[in-house]
Image: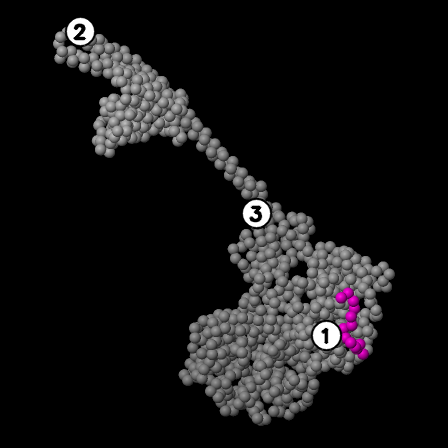
Amino acid sequence: MFFISGTTQSRAQRYALQNYNTENGLVQSQALAMVQDPLNRLWVGTFGGLSVFDGSEFKTYTRADGLISNTVTAIGFAPNGITWIGTAEGICRFDGLHFKSYALDPHSETSLINDIKVDNQNRVWLRSGNKIYIFRGDRFELVPTDGIITSMFLDEQRYIHVCYLQKGVFRFINNQWQPLTDQVPDGFCLSVYQSKYSGKMYILTTTGLYLVNDRSLQLLTNDLPGFDITTLATKIVVDQNEHIWIAVGNGLWFYDDTHGFVKLNASNGYTDEQTLSIFIDNTNNIWLGTNGSGIFKYSDSPFKIFDNTQIPFAKSIISIFQRGKDLILSTAYHGIFRFDDQTNTITQIPLPNFATSIISIYDDPDRGTYYATYRGLWNAHNGKLKQIGTKSIPFITDWTTINDEVWCTNGEGLCVIDKDSLRLVKQGPYRRLIAYDKETIILGTKKGLLKYNLLTGTTDSLKGLQMLRVQCMTGNAQRLYIGTDDNGIVVYEYQTGRIYTISHDDGLSCNYVYNLLIDSDNMLWAGTGCGIDRIRFSETGTYQLKSYGKTEGLSGAESNERASFQDAEGNIWFGTTKGLYMYNKRKEKTFSSAPFVTLTNVQLFSKNIPTGKYSDSTIPYLRIPYQPVFGHNQNNLTFSFRAISLSSPERIEYRYKLEGADPNFVETKQTSVVYTNLPPGQYTFIVYASDENGNWAENAYRYPFTIKAIFYQTTIFKALVSLLLGILIAYIIYWYSRKKEARRQWEMRLREEEQNKVRQRTAEDFHDEIGNKITRINLLTMMAERKISGQTELGDILSQIRNNTQSLYHGSKDIIWSLQRESNFLKEALLRIQQNASAILEDTGIRLHIEEEPPIRFDVKMPLDYSRNLILIFKEAINNAIKYAGAENIYLRFYEDIDSSVVLELSDDGKGYDPENSTGGNGLKNMHNRARAIKGKLSIISHAGEGTTIRLRMFKYSFKK
C-alpha cells in the first residue's frame, strides 16, 4: 500500500507463564522436585523445605516440623494417605500429622534420595544414586541392579522402569528386570518418559531423541541444539500437544515435529536460570522448577502474547485492522506497522506528515483507510493519499459507515465525510456512534444515548439509558451493548426494551470497559481495565461469562480504547498496556473438572484451636480437630475453605451452608465465613466449589461439630425439670384434691352426723307417737270385735281396720329402720329384705330360697335413702309375686358381678307373663322410678309359663358422693 521503510524479523511470541516464588509463599526459590497429590495439591521440594500449593496459598514443612532434612529431592504418595519424602539425608514418611524417618543401607555411599515411585501393587520404590530400594514390612530392602542409573519412572500401567546410562531401559515385571527394547540407543541414555495422553514413550540420549515402537527405537531427531547435558539435571516430559519438554544444564527446550526445538528463556517470559524439575499436573499445566526463580506454571493459553520485545511499541496499539493476510497495527505516536503473524515479520509503513500524531483510524474496505491526526484528516486508498478538509484538528472519537457514507463524531458533534471535506451535521457532545438501521444512528454521550434520524435530522433519547457514561458501543440485531467507565456493560434489548447490567459483581473483570466486539460466533468480547471477558448469550437473554486473567497470561493487561479486531482466520486481537494479544479459539480449553474442596482452618474466636482440645483426634494434613465438641460459650467459629485448583483458582465460586443454622446455601467468592453466638446443638458445615467455568458438582466437604449446652440447656435437664414440674403440679393438684375431698368428707360426715341425729330423733318420735297410737288403734279394734258378737258386717269392717293397722305398723317399722344409721350399709339392707320376704311369705305357703355367693362385704356403704328404696322395690316385687305369679318358690339372690356391680335378683317359678303385651301398673312404674333414684338398672325378664325374674344392678361408684 505504501513504501516500506524496513522489515525486521520479530522474536517468538511471549508465553503465558506464571511465576511463584518466595514472595508468594514458596519456602525457597530452588525447586528440586514437584508432584501432585490425590487432592490435586502441588508438592514442591526445595533446599529450604517442603511447600504444598493449593493453587492460591503455600503451606510449608521444614525440619522444625519433623522433616529429616530441609533439602527435599523427591516426593511420592501411597494410596493409604502416606506421603514419602526423600531428602539429601535420607527418607521419611508423613501421615499428615507426624514424620517418621527410615534408614537405608548403612554402607551406602550417599543418603540422597533421587526418585520415589509407588507401583501398581502399591509398593514404594526409591532411587538413591545407583541403588534401587523397595519398602517391605517396616524397612527398605535393596533391589539388585547392574549399571549406572540415570532415572526411574512409572509407565501408564504403573510398572517400575529404570534407565541405565549405557544399557538402555529396563522394566521390573515378574520380580525381575527385563529390557524394554531389543536394541540399546546410541550414546548415553539420560531420561525416559511415557506420555499420559498418547501413551508414547520417549528416550533422550546424548546423541538424539527416540520414540519407542513396540520393542524397537525410532530416531526422532539427532539435532540436539547445543545441550549442556548432565545426568543430574536432565528431565523430560510430554504435554497434551505431544510437545516434548527437556530440561538440561543450559536451559529449557520443547520440541515438536513442525518447529523443532524452541528454547524458553527470559526473552519469551521464562528465565535464563537452570531448570531443575518439570511436572505436568492433572489439568495439563506444566510446572517448571528453577534454580533461583521459584516455580513457573505454563498453561496452553488460547492467547498468544506479543510485547515490545516481539513487536515495537506493542503496548501502544490503538487500532487494529487487516489488509490481505497482514495485520495493520497503529500506535498513537510511534507509527503504523504491518505484521505477519505466520512469519513474525514486522514492517513499518511510512505516512508522511502525520505518522507520529494519530488520534484515531478507521478502515473502510471500499473507501480505504481514514487517519485522524493532529495534522489533519487523511484518506489512503488504492495507493493514493489525500487530505480531507476540516475546519480544525479532527478529534474524531468514533466512526461508522451507513448508506455508503462515512460518519464520525468529534469534539463538535456528529459529522459526515462529504466528498473531500468533513461536514458537521448535528452539533452536540457526542463521543460514540453505531448504525442502528439505514435511517437511524445511535449516539453515545457522557449523559446517555440518543437516536438520530437521518431523514428528519432530529434526536430522541432512549428510555432508561439517559444517564449512562458511554465509553464504547457495539450491537447486533437483538441487542445493543454499551460499555461504560463506571458501571460495566449495559445491555439493551431492542424488541422488549429490557435493560440490564453486567458488572464486576456479576463476574466481569472490571467495570471500566474500553472496547467491545461481537465475533463471528455472535459472542461479545469486552476489553476492560483489568483484562478481557467473553460473554455468550442464549436466545432467552441469559448469558455465560468467562474472564481471562493471569492463568492465560493476561495479568494486569489493561485494554486500549477501541483496540480489538477479529481477522479473517477468526483470531481476535486485543491491544493492551501489556502488549498485543491474539485469541485462538481452537486452543480454548473444552473441559474442566470439579476441584476438590477442603477446609484450611477452623478458628475459635479468631484463634487457632490447640491440637487435642475439643477433640481426641485431628484431621491429617489439615491439622484441625475431627468432630469437635465445644462448650456452650465456645460458639464463635471461623471456617476457612479452599477449592484446590492449579488452573484458575480466581474463577472459582463457593456455596456454603451451616446445617443447623442457615436455611439455605450462600454463594460467594470469599474463602472464609464467621458464625457468632451459635446456640447449643449439632451442626455440619458444608461447602461446594464450582469449576473455572461456573459449573457445580457434588464435591462438597462436610465438617460436623457440636456445641454442648450448659447443664440447664441440656435435653436431660429440661426433661428432668419438666418431670419435676409435672410431679409438682400433679402433687399440688393431688394435694388440693385431697384437701378438697377431705373437706367434702368432713362436710359429709358432719352432714351425716346431723342427718343421723335427725333420723334418730325422727325414728324415736315416730315410734313414740305414731307407733304407739297405731298399736292403741289395733288394740281398740280387737276389743270392739269381742263386744259385737254376732254382727257380721261390722266385724268385717273392724277386721279390715285391724289388718290395715297391722300393715301400717309393719310399714312404719321399715321406715323407722331406714332412718337409723345402720340402714346405710348394703349388707344391712339385704338382711332387711330377707326379713321382710320371710315375714310376707310366712302364711302364704310359698317357699323362700336365699342365695348369696359370693357374700357381700359388710363395709359397703350406700348414700342416704338407698336402703329405703331397695326395700320398697323388693317389697313391691314380692307382693306382686304373691298376687299374680301363682308361684310355689321364690328365689332371692345377691352377688357381686365381674364388673364390680352388685346384683339383686328376685325370681319365681310362677306362670310368668309377656312384658311386651303388659301395660304394667303403678307398682312397676314406682319400682323403675326408685331404681333410677339410686342410679341402678332394673330389668324384668319373664316368659309365659317360665316364671319371672326381676334383676336390679347397682354400681358401687354410684355409692360415692
| Amino acid type, callout 3 | Pro
Q: Name the residue under label 1.
A: 201
Q: Is 182 part of what is drawn in magenta? A: yes
Q: Residues within 10 Å of mark 2 (few under 14, many from 20)?
A: few
Task: Tell me whether circle 3 and circle 1 mark residues in contact (CB < 8 Å).
Answer: no
- First to last magenta residue range: 174-186
The secondary structure making up most of the magenta span is loop
Residue at image location 68% in from the left, 49% down from the top:
612
Mark 1 element type: strand
| Amino acid type, callout 2 | Arg
Label 1 vs 2, first from the N-terminus: 1
- Gap between marks 1 and 2, in whole Å? 156 Å
Residue 680: give its label: 3
Mark 2 element type: helix
| Amino acid type, callout 1 | Met
Task: Tell me whether circle 1 and circle 2 mark residues in contact (CB < 8 Å).
Answer: no
Depth order, front residue of 11/833:
833
Figure check: 113 above or below 566: above
Residue 786: give its label: 2
Mark 3 element type: loop
Residue at image location 65% in from the left, 67% down from the top:
646
Locate the N terminus and report the quarter of the image it occupies: bottom right
Q: Residues within 10 Å of mark 3 (few under 14, many from 20)?
A: many
Label 3 vs 1, first from the N-terminus: 1
- Gap between marks 3 and 1, in whole Å? 60 Å
Q: Where is residue 99 in the image (x, y as percent from the top left)?
A: 75, 56
